[in-house]
Amino acid sequence: MQVKRFFAPTMPEALRMVRSEMGDDAVILSSKRVEDGVEIVTALDYDEGEVRSQLGVADEDKANAARLAELQAEKHRKLEEAMAKSRAHISEVQQRSHHGQEPVGPAAVGSAEPEGEPENTPSPGGEGDALSSMRAEIHSLRDMLQQMNGQQGTTNPGEKTQGVVEQRLSDRLQDLGLPRDQGRELAAEHGQGRLDAGWKSALKALAARVETVRENPLERGGVYALLGPTGSGKTTTIGKMAAQFVLRHGAEQLALVTTDRYRVAAHEQLFVFGRILNVPVRVVDEANSLDAILDDLSDRKLILIDTAGLTAADRGWQEQIEELVSSRHPVRPYLLISATSQPRIMQSTWHCYNAVGLAGCILTKTDEALTLGEVVGFAAQSRLPVAFYTNGQKIPDDLHRAGAGDLVKQAVRRHQALNRGESAMAEGA
């Protein structure tokens, strides 16, 4: 915990000083008017349990949270005032010892004190009392510094501030939803200086790691296979892509294909889309190979392939993968990643389907996720170019082209909204 006192002519100026030096996560322990303006005592990494232990106030009835903060601020204020008095007294003793001699400072006192000599041994002449007094003040000052170390953890404020900024930045990135290792890495690279500056810099770096598909697949055309586990939104996403394409280019330029011959009634939703959009829907089965169907549909500008949500342990997994990999046609496989999945599930899905030579990914169900940092972190780690993201069930409206900066901004807004909701719940409790 780092505690610091600020002085300014006005409260807004004092708050700006706090925000500039300690960031937005600083806790105000106390504020009061002084002769020349206002005084604010703040803390970073404030731990109420730790403060109660340090102050010996275990009973909450004797000191509530507000009173406890005031006690901590008062303790810090007294320590600073005592240290200032000790420094002034040492300076006074130094000046008194200057009668025709070299200045006697803390470093000189240390070097003039041989190892093993009692620290109160008088020096020749009239300096014994002065030196003894200065030594006593130095040891008192050291004790007070040690007390402040209990609050701040180091006698080097610059190092502590820097360490705190990096830690707070790492915590904030993990609160955003990023994996721990990724959050720590970004914090180590951008946790210098002010917290808010480091936060903005880290977000820019995160966005730079997210690759996106530059050319819209719906404009480029070709053969695209959508892969992913059951429930990732493959068929619904195909419906959105198909509807957007038909609105721009017409139904005669599109065809839909499914390789899911393993589940009962697996084709029904895709056939519904086909009837609504007036486009053909073909099924890969024992009588119709994928290559044969693609040969028949070679006059179509865009072919979208819906696949079965299989894993390596499922029957037919290897058969479906071989169909895609060995096709004579340039099939571009896109992996669908649900934003509601756990990070480990996202990684596992990626490794499971990576054998087909993924061309990119589509992020689905972003409207259902509590936070978006997990899926943005996945995109940054996997380096899979993101083509689209979906944020609802409306066809074709809820399919959007992906931009790295936009995805990171959405993650930040979701994080801020979540924090506001938690704050409102805490205030209403």
Image (cartoon, rainbow, N blue to C red):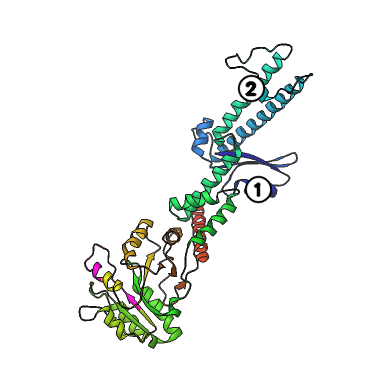
Determine whether 293 is above or below 65 in the image. below
Residue 32, given in percent of the width and then of the height, sits at: 67, 41
Residue 306: within the magenta? yes
Q: Badges 2 and 1: C-beta atoms under 8 Å apart?
A: no
| Residue furthest to the right | 100
Residue 280: within the magenta? no
Residue 47, given in percent of the width and then of the height, sits at: 51, 40
Helix, strand or loop at disc 1? helix
The amino acid at mark 1 is Leu
Q: Residue at x 39, y 86 (%)?
A: 253
Whether residue 280 is visible to the viewer of this picture, yes or no, is yes
- The residue where tag 1 is placed is 15
> Residue 110's mark?
2
Q: Residues within 10 Å of mark 1 (few under 14, many from 20)?
A: some
| Residue furthest to the left | 286
Determine whether 30 is above or below 263 in the image. above
Residue 250, given in percent of the width and then of the height, sits at: 42, 87
The amino acid at mark 2 is Gly
Image quadrant in which you'd find residue 350 = bottom left
Q: Viewed as shown, does residue 78 lie left or right of 231? A: right
Mark nearer the viewer, 2 or 1? 2
Whether residue 428 is visible to the viewer of this picture, yes or no, is no
Determine whether 337 is above or below 331 in the image. above
Q: Residue at x 33, y 62 (%)?
A: 349
Q: Residue at x 66, y 22 (%)?
A: 137
Give the magenta-colored segment's residue range: 304-319
Q: Residue at x 58, y 50 (%)?
A: 195
Helix, strand or loop at disc 2? helix
Q: Viewed as shown, does residue 321 lie left or right of 362? A: left
- Magenta portion: prevailing SS class: loop
